[in-house]
Structures are given as structure tokens and as C-alpha cells.
Amino acid sequence: LPQLTRQALQLNGELSRDDLASERTDELLDWGGDLTYRLLAQRVGVVIRLEGSLAVDLACQCARCLKPFRQRLALDPWTLEVPLDGEDAAEVRGDLVDLTPFLREDTVLALPQHPLCDTGCRGLSSTPPRGDRETDANCPPKAGVSAWLALDRLKL
């Protein structure tokens, strides 16, 4: 904090996978490496303003076909104001401020909710067990076949 009072600081480094681990449990996502950060920190009154970039590799499974793949999550540009006063204030220990919870939170919020190996992924290929199922969820409807056909055939 005393250094930030005099001048802006360049912060470059990595946050380990263990420090990124949180309560979030997603079977389709895992940290593929450490979080890399490149930040410029400035003190503006009772706030620390951070500007720069965050990046981390993710080990994913496709939400449609379950194929494993890797994806890079990059927040660039990334900006955050960390309060030093009030109920949302950062934890200050002596002259140091722990920014880890703020980096973790923004990274977790940016994780894909349904990771896809490819935007055109059609999911698991399946063969209908009997007959011709025109409305199979993994197959596009045939030309001229209504998307509502399955509902029309529903017998209540």
C-alpha cells in the first residue's frame, strides 16, 4: 500500500491452480494450468484500480459430445476496482492487500457454462433403436418435417 501511494505498480505473475480452486464443482471443467496475470495497480483514494489481463488454460469436456478438449480463457482487457473501505473491502494485512479472491471471482464468473469443442458440434451420434425417428434430438429434422411432429404424435 505505501508503494501504491507514491506510484502505480506493475504486477506480473501466476496464481496457482490450488489458489484458483473454489467451491464450484463442474464436471465438464477443470483448471488446465495456473492463472497468468499482467496488471497495472493504482491507488485512487480508498480504491485500488487494476487494469490488465488474466489468462488460464482450461481442461474441458464438450457439453454435447463429451469429447475432451483444451480452451484458453483470456480476460483482456480486464479492469477492477478493489475497495479498501466498507463492507466489500479487501483484506489488508500490514501493508499488503490480498487480491487473490478478486482474481478468482472474476475468472470463475467468466468460465463457460456449457463448454463446446466446436460451435457446430452436433453431439453424440446415435442410431435410433427401432424405425425411423424423425425427431431424434441429435439429428436435424428432415426437409419438410415439422419440428412439432413429436408433439403432434403425443397421446395423452
Image (tube, rainbow, N blue to C red):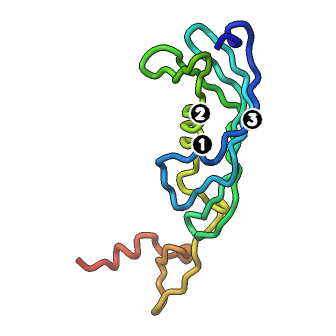
Which residue has dot 2 on it? 100
Sequence-earlier tag: 1 or 3: 3
In-front residue for pair 142/132:
132
Relative to 25, residue 15 above or below:
above
Crowding at label 3, few (<14), some or many (≥20) Cα neighbours within 10 Å?
few
The quadrant holding residue 100 is top right
Whichever of labels 1 and 2 marks the residue nearer the N terminus, that label is: 1
Image position, residue 20 (x, y; %):
59, 44
How far is the residue under mark 1 from the one under mark 3?
A: 13 Å
- Kind of residue at disc 1: Asp
Looking at the picture, which amino acid does disc 2 mark? Thr
For the residues labelled 2 and 3, the Cα–Cα distance comes to 12 Å
For label 1, the residue is 19
Total labels drawn:
3
Q: Which element is circle 2 on?
A: helix
**Disc 3 element:** strand
Outermost residue, bottom side: 130
The quarter of the rendered structure image containing the N terminus is: top right
Query: Where does residue 91 sit, x and y in percent of width and height?
Result: 52, 23
